[in-house]
Image (cartoon, grey):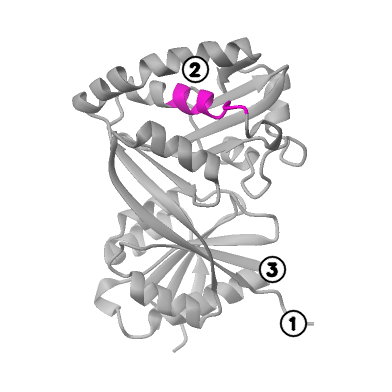
Amino acid sequence: MDVDLKQLNYMEYAVNFQPILGSALLQYYVRLATTGDYVLGFYDEGKPVSSAVLLQRNCPPDCLELTYFCVAPALCERGYGRAVVEKTMDFAREQGKRELTCRLTKSAPFFDAALCIIEAAGFHYVEDAHVFRCEIDVTNREKWQRSVSMYFEKLHKRLNRLGFSCVSFAHADDRLLQRVMDDSNNGFDNRYPIAPLVSGMHGRFLPDYSFIAYKDAVPAAVTIVLHVDSESLVFQLISVADAYKSSGSLLLPVMCSLERVISSEYKRVSYCVYTSNDASLKVIKDLFGGLTAHETIMLCYRSEIEKPN
C-alpha cells in the first residue's frame, strides 16, 4: 500500500485530520510542534487517513522522535499503519536524520498493533519510561500540606547550609540562564537538551513554574514545566547535572515546582521519567507517590535510518 505525504500546519491538521482521527493526544503533540518539528498528513487517493508528529526536542541534532502516529479508527487493520511508519522513516531520512526514536504506551488499546508495526519497520527496544498523572484537588492539596511541605522546609534549609539556592526561570539572572541553557557545556545529560524546551515552545514553557537549583552560580538541577491546556501541566524535564547527582539538590527544583503547581488553579499534572534516570525516578516516586492517580509504562524504541553508503 502507498500513501501520499504532506507537511501540515496546525490549521490544516485541525480542519482536515482531527475530525476523522479524533485523538486528543495527537492534537496535543501537534500543538507542541515548533521549528525543527514536523506534522505529517497522509492521504490515500486525496482523502486524509492518518497523521504523525516528529519532534526534535530531547533528541540529538541527527535524530527525531516519532512522538505519535494515528490512523483513522474507521480505517484500522487495512495496512495504513505500516505504510505511514515506512513513509515517515523515509521522510526523516530525507531531512538528513540518522536515527528515529518512538515511545509506545503499554496500556494503550492499540499498543500490540503499534508494536508489531514499528518492530517490522526495524525499530529495536531501548528502555522503559514511567508516566505519572496527578489530579490536583482539595484532597491532594491537603495531602501535600500534611506529608510534604514540612519535609520541604527542612530540606530547603539543609541544602541552603550546603550552599544551594533555588530560583524560578522567571526570576533567574541572565548569567545563570545563559549557563543552564548552554546545552554543550552545562553539565546536564545532553540527551535531554534544555534550551529547546525553554525557547521553542510557542508560549507553553512556564518560567514561573520551572526552577533552577544552583551553587556558586553553577546550575545543579532543573525542572521544566509546560502548559498543556487550561487545566493541565506537564513536567517535561527533571534533570540534575552530573557533578551534583549525589548532592540531593534535584529535590529543590522539583519541590519548588510542585509547590507552585499545587497552589495554582490547574487541576492535573503529569510527568514522564526514564527508568534509567534513577535519581529522577526516585524523587518522583517519593514525592508524588501519594498524589498519583495513574501510572503507566511507556516503552522506548530506536531505529537507525541513515542512508546506506
Q: Which residue is mark 2?
A: 155
Residue at figure coordinates x 44%, y 12% from the top left: 153
Magenta stretch in the rendered image: 247-257
* Amino acid at circle 1: Pro
**Is 255 within the magenta?**
yes
Percent across and percent down for residue 31 are 43, 48
Percent across and percent down for residue 21 are 30, 65
Q: Residues within 10 Å of mark 2 (few under 14, many from 20)?
A: some
Callouts 2 and 1 close, C-beta under 8 Å: no
Residue at figure coordinates x 61%, y 10% from the top left: 161
Quarter of the image containing the C terminus? Answer: bottom right
Establish if 196 lies above or below 267.
below
* Amino acid at circle 2: Leu
Is residue 234 something one can see in this rendering?
A: no
Instruction: Indicate the secondary structure of the residue bearing disc 2.
Output: helix
The residue lying toward the viewer, choosing from 62 and 45, is 62
Residue at figure coordinates x 65%, y 74% from the top left: 305
Percent across and percent down for residue 241 are 66, 35
Left or right: residue 45 versus residue 217 is left
Q: Which residue is mark 3?
A: 98
Residue at figure coordinates x 60%, y 76% from the top left: 90
Corner quadrant of residue 270: top left
Disc on the earlier residue, 2 or 3: 3
* Amino acid at circle 3: Arg
The residue lying toward the viewer, choosing from 157 and 179, is 157
